Image: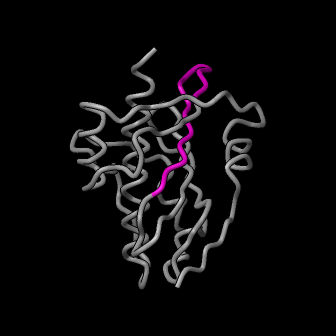
Amino acid sequence: MSCATEYLTRDEFLQDAFDDSVPPPQTAWLRGELREGVKHILGHRYSSLRIRFWRIDTTQPRTAWILKEIGKELPITVGVVVDNGVIESVQVLEFRESRGGEVRYPAFTRQFESMTLTDQFQLSGNIDGISGATLSVSALKRLCRLALYLHDYATAIE
């Protein structure tokens, strides 16, 4: 049974991420090495062939990603803002499962702030789990790793 709840729209997330000066979207096509890296992080192929992202270059590159990953049975939509290779914020935009929705609370998502991606494609710190939400927690961890990996890719291309 699905209990889909939208907590934040895409536009609201992007306006917050870029202080109302939202750049035009760009596209990362999942081909070759990028596709393999994404598959390594998620443990499976991503659900589409391309991922849209938003990027602005001020004194340091800043990207915003809206990504989806299966929790237990249904996708969780998450927005991640990465500033110069460091997670600035994580927000659950839409949660569709009947359990595990606690991952949307700031008390949980703030744990990701200031994390980076290690050379082993892991988060640089530990995330405390939530009892009864193990699969949702794991999904958010994978998406944050993915956002950091994609940020590195997006900022390497000019």
Instruction: Give coordinates of residue 12: x percent, y percent.
Output: 74, 49
The span picked out in magenta is: 55-68
Q: Which colour style is shown? A: one colour
Judged from this view, the residue extending furthest toward the top is 158
Residue 21 x %, y %:
75, 30
Above or below for 127 versus 16: below
Quarter where residue 62 is shown: top right
Residue 42 sits in which quadrant?
bottom left
Give me the residue at 34% from left, 42% from top. 117
Q: Farthest residue to the front: give it.
A: 49
Residue closer to the observer: 71 or 147? 71
Residue closest to the eye, 140 or 107: 140
Residue 56 part of the magenta-drawn span:
yes
Outermost residue on the right side: it is 20
Q: Position of residue 68 (x, y in %)?
A: 47, 56
Q: Is residue 147 above or below residue 3?
A: above
Residue 140 against residue 24 in the figure, above or below: below
What is the count of numbered marks? Answer: 0
Q: Which residue occupies 50% across, 83% down? A: 99
Q: Position of residue 86 (x, y in %)?
A: 46, 39
Q: Which SS type dominates the magenta stretch? A: strand
Residue at image location 48% in from the left, 60% down from the top = 111
**Residue depicted at x 31% and y 32%:** 31
Would you say residue 141 sits in the magenta stretch?
A: no
